[in-house]
Image (spheres, rainbow, N blue to C red):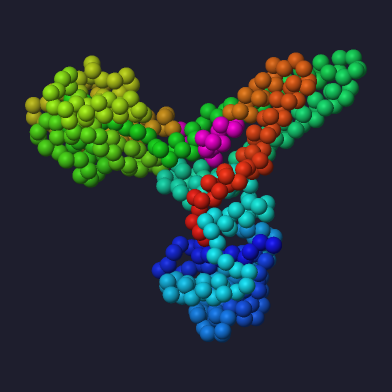
């Protein structure tokens, strides 16, 4: 029998309210010991919470949720306490003194939901992402996954593969009859090819990690081109040191900003020139080159003819008295002209939407994507097999890879790594 576990699930105190959850076979017994008489299920009831010796600890709302139709699939109790540290600590101490109860470890509530069939592994992964979401795009994708969008898609794929496998079994059973196997093979191949095409469209989407990493934008150009000033203007704060002395920036400087629900990683770099005798400046230039190489977008503030391929040409300090007019293919900016900075941000957001399209639903993790890729390879191979037995084996392999997304073949090590991302009360 599982232990009964308890933990604060509303964030650590102090707070206005602290929700302390208890889940397991002794949850209702603990409720009776601390809150007195029985409580109507799923109805908030105001009670005095007492320790096992009868001393009052708090006046709180108590809710009882009989299993298995609960978040964990077990009997579940919630104590809505006043959120002071001493109050929470006293109630936790009282619970810990009861037989069969212990504090939960990280992610244990959600793990029990998985083990009891209330969530599958794809939903758990989505819930973990929802807790960690920092941008609107991440939130939308994570919420869709937590609500079962990936699970439903995978279940549909598994159903179609199972149907194709059943058709192969039937064809093999009647393979001694004229033309049965060959006619069924053509029909099955078409169905599998259609499924492989549908999965390929899912693989074309960005991953969850790509959303989290955001769009990397490197500001590059010769010394004293206005990179650091533009860097600060884009961030709307003084993050980089700005002086009139060329070569002030000697290293890369990174900052993250969110615009329109997308994360942008801005990187200011050392000025680039043909030659320098300064060893520190040389290192800075090498790091600038590496940053340009890994950038999603480069804002080039120098001679357009020396710009990296695909760079966004920026005509910085456009309001300087001695500044030449901006080239027709460059965006003119001035740090004292908010409209020019807003126009540059508009352009960057448009380019970002091309690099990382806004998700219309749940996205796969890289690890999940690898499994889907393997399944797609197996399905594609199945469409070129001329032997029913070999086709059946390819379908079986695809089925195993896809089923693992829902936790069917999940290993303990993978589960431990996943649930460690959760807080103790989740």
Identify which residue, 196 or 424, lies in the foreground: 424
Q: Is residue 245 left or right of residue 335?
A: left
Relative image position of residue 146 (x, y in whole percent)? 57, 47
In reply to whether residue 362 is colored magenta, the answer given is: yes
Residue 300, quarter of picture: top left
Residue occupying the point 57% across, 66% down? 102
Number of numbered labels in the structure image: 0
Residue occupying the point 17% across, 19% down? 274
Relative image position of residue 261 (x, y in whole percent)? 40, 42
Q: Is residue 279 left or right of residue 112?
A: left
Q: Residue furthest right?
A: 177
Relative image position of residue 211 (x, y in whole percent)? 44, 38
Kindly tell me whether residue 237 is visible in this rendering.
Answer: yes
Identify which residue, 270 or 226, lies in the foreground: 270
Q: Is residue 295 left or right of residue 125?
A: left
Residue occupying the point 22% across, 43% down? 239
Residue occupying the point 49% across, 38% down? 208
Residue 76, quarter of picture: bottom right
Relative image position of residue 265 (x, y in whole percent)? 33, 37
Which stretch is magenta? 357-372
Q: Is residue 118 above or below residue 309?
A: below
For the N terminus, the quadrant is bottom right
Kindly tell me whether residue 187 is visible in this rendering.
Answer: no
Residue 109, quarter of picture: bottom right
In reply to whether residue 425 is colored magenta, the answer given is: no
Q: Is residue 425 above or below residue 54?
A: above
Q: Residue furthest bottom?
A: 54
């Amino acid at each position: 029998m599982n232990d009964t576990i308890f933990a604060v699930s509303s964030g650590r105190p102090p707070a206005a309210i602290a929700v302390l959850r208890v889940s397991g076979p002794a949850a209702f017994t603990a409720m009776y010991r601390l809150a007195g008489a029985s409580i109507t299920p799923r109805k908030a009831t105001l009670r005095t919470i007492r320790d096992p010796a009868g001393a009052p600890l708090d006046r709180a709302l108590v809710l009882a949720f009989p299993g298995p139709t609960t978040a964990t699939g077990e009997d579940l109790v919630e104590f809505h306490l006043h959120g002071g540290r001493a109050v929470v600590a006293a109630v936790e101490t009282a619970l810990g003194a009861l037989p069969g109860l212990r504090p939960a470890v990280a992610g244990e509530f959600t793990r029990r939901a998985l083990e009891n069939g209330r969530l599958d592994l794809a939903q758990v992964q989505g819930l973990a992402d929802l807790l960690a979401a920092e941008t609107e795009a991440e939130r939308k994708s994570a919420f869709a996954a937590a609500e079962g969008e990936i699970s439903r898609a995978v279940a549909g794929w598994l159903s179609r593969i199972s149907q194709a496998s059943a058709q192969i079994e039937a064809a093999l059973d009647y393979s001694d009859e004229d033309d049965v196997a060959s006619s069924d093979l053509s029909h099955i191949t078409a169905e599998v090819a259609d499924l492989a095409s549908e999965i390929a469209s899912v693989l074309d989407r960005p991953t969850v990690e790509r959303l989290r990493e955001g769009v990397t934008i490197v500001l590059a150009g010769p010394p004293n081109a206005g990179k650091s000033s533009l860097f600060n203007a884009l961030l709307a704060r003084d993050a980089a040191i700005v002086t009139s002395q060329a070569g002030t920036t000697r290293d890369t400087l990174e900052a993250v900003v969110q615009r329109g629900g997308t994360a942008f990683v801005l990187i200011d770099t050392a000025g680039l020139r043909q030659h320098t005798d300064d060893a520190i400046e040389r290192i800075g230039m090498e790091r600038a080159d590496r940053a340009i190489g890994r950038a999603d977008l480069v804002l080039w503030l120098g001679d357009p003819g020396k710009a990296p391929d695909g760079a966004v040409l920026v005509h910085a300090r456009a309001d300087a008295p001695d500044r030449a007019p901006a080239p027709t293919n460059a965006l003119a900016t001035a740090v004292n002209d908010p409209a020019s900075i807003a126009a540059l941000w508009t352009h960057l957001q448009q380019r970002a939407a091309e690099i990382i399209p806004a998700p219309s639903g749940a996205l796969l993790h890289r690890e999940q994507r690898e499994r889907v890729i393997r399944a797609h390879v197996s399905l594609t191979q199945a469409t070129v097999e001329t032997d029913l037995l070999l086709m059946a084996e390819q379908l079986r392999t695809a089925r195993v890879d896809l089923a693992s997304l829902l936790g069917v073949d999940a290993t303990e090590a993978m589960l431990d790594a996943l649930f460690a991302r959760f807080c103790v009360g989740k």
